Every structure is written in structure tokens, then in C-alpha cells.
Amino acid sequence: MADHIPSDPFILLSFINTKLRDEYPSLNELCASLDISAEQITDRLAQIGMRYDHDLNKFG
């Protein structure tokens, strides 16, 4: 994971969902801005049972 991204998956969930809600219309745009792959985020959050919902633009 990138240095500027939380490593704890539960904190990462909150961080990513807040960014998606407040700043980015899609996971791909967020990841491009943070210079990290969407696969890294989805894989890490899948470890705690979270999946990205494109329609809602959040993990849940």
C-alpha cells in the first residue's frame, strides 16, 4: 500500500468511503488521484468482507 493510505483495513474503509462521498465520483478517479490501483484497494477491503458498489460509489 502507498504510504499515504491507511494500512488497517477498517480505517482504510472509512478513509476510502469518505473520499468517495466527499471528493470523487468513482473509485477509479480516487485511485488515479492517489496513485494507487483500484485492485489494491478492493483486495485489501475484500479481506474484511467489503465490496465496491458502483451505483452507490462506496464500499459496503
Image (cartoon, rainbow, N blue to C red):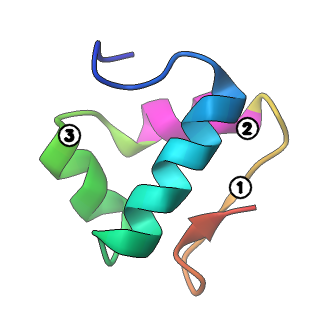
Q: Are marks 1 and 3 in contact (CB under 8 Å)?
A: no
Sequence order check, earlier mark of 1 and 3: 3
Residue 39 located left or right of residue 49 = left
Determine which residue is flagged by label 1.
51
Q: Amino acid at mark 3?
A: Leu
Which percent across, then down, holds residue 41?
A: 49, 37
Residue 49 located left or right of residue 30 = right
Q: Mark 3, mark 2: which one is toward the viewer?
A: 3
Q: Quadrant of the N terminus?
A: top left
Q: Are marks 3 and 2 in contact (CB under 8 Å)?
A: no
Sequence order check, earlier mark of 3 and 2: 3
Residues rendered magenta in the picture: 39-46
Q: Amino acid at mark 1?
A: Arg
Secondary structure of residue under mark 2: helix
Q: CA distance from mark 2 to mark 1?
A: 6 Å
Mark 2 surroundings within 10 Å by alpha-carbon count, few (fewer than 14), some (14 through 19), many (20 or more): some
For the point 60% across and 83% down, the residue is: 56
Mark 1 surroundings within 10 Å by alpha-carbon count, few (fewer than 14), some (14 through 19), many (20 or more): some
User: Is the residue 48 above or below the residue 27 in the image?
Assistant: above
Sequence order check, earlier mark of 2 and 1: 2
Determine which residue is flagged by label 3.
34
Number of numbered markers: 3
Determine which residue is flagged by label 2.
46
Mark 3 surroundings within 10 Å by alpha-carbon count, few (fewer than 14), some (14 through 19), many (20 or more): few
User: Is the residue 46 above or below the residue 26 in the image?
Assistant: above
The front one of 17 and 59 is 17
Secondary structure of residue under mark 3: helix
Secondary structure of residue under mark 1: loop
Q: Quadrant of the C terminus?
A: bottom right
For the point 73% across and 38% down, the residue is: 46
Q: Picture quarter containing residue 27?
A: bottom left
Q: CA distance from mark 3 to mark 2?
A: 19 Å
